[in-house]
Amino acid sequence: MFLDNARLNWILPITTLRRSKAASRRNQKQQLETIMNNFPNEITMLPALALALLAGVTEMKAQQENPDQHEGYLSPSSAVASGKAPGMKVRLLAENRGVKSYAIVLAKGDEVMSGLTDFAKQNKVTSASFTAIGAFSRATVAWFDDSRKEFKLVPIEQQVELVSMIGNIALSGDQPVVHAHVSVASSDGAVRGGHLINAFVFPTLEFTQTIG
């Protein structure tokens, strides 16, 4: 890529310099200075270009992994990962005239929104409501920023007790969507809450869900 006409302008003087036995040291020095002054700027810029390329690749990879997430915000249409609640257990409590009541128990380390979404898909839930009691090792709640039409994320990086959790499941197109709000308390009794983005169970979480 360097052997075009523009680059030959600084390659040819080097050849001429080497072959010229009659040139004085002073002339050689002047020729070298001319060559270095005309040396392509691209070469000296390579480290900066490499860093810029690396930054671009890193940003592209992050967007591919989670294209709906910007720094500190999340799109309402962001998908929920499946299979993140392998310890989930489900039991049918009652059924009457098409209305079913379930007990759903999540185990330590299970991710709540993933478990509820998987349950809804597996059982073809189109309409449901639920409440829950338990605790989390950590969670992320959110507040809807109307100016951006995105959720502002509020990470909670500590063990918390679930004070309240209510929510519902409805269809968006042909897919069930879980919508939940929570309030959680830390060890000093401080309560935080909002729209639930994710939460990891510790040590257990028990749901009562009504479908129909």
Image (tube, helix red, strand yellow):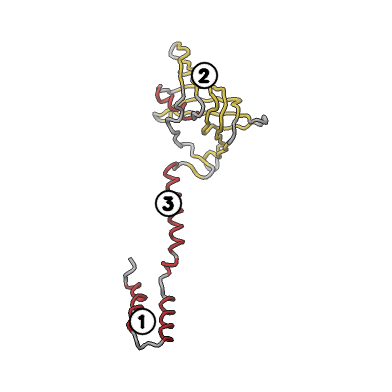
Q: Secondary structure beneath disc 2?
A: strand
Q: Secondary structure beneath disc 1?
A: helix
Q: Which residue is mark 2?
A: 208
Residue 123: horizontal and vertical position, in percent?
Answer: 40, 21
Q: Amino acid at mark 3?
A: Val
Q: Is residue 39 left or right of residue 138?
A: left
Q: Residues within 10 Å of mark 2 (few under 14, many from 20)?
A: some
Q: Which residue is mark 3?
A: 57
Up/down of 105 relative to 73, above or below: above
Up/down of 159 relative to 25, above or below: above
- The residue located at (42%, 30%) in the rendering is 83
Q: Amino acid at mark 1?
A: Leu
As rendered, which of 30 and 132 lies closer to the eye? Answer: 30
C-alpha span from label 2 to label 1: 87 Å
- The residue located at (34%, 68%) in the rendering is 2
Residue 84: horizontal and vertical position, in percent?
Answer: 45, 30
Q: Quadrant of residue 196?
A: top right
- The residue located at (48%, 39%) in the rendering is 75
Q: Which residue is mark 1?
A: 17
Quarter of the picture containing the C terminus is top left
Please tell me whether mark 2 or mark 1 is closer to you in this view: 1
As rendered, which of 104 and 175 lies closer to the eye? Answer: 104
As rendered, which of 99 and 183 lies closer to the eye? Answer: 183
Callout 1–callout 3 Cβ contact below 8 Å? no
Please tell me whether mark 3 or mark 2 is closer to you in this view: 3
Up/down of 62 relative to 13, above or below: above
Q: Amino acid at mark 2?
A: Thr
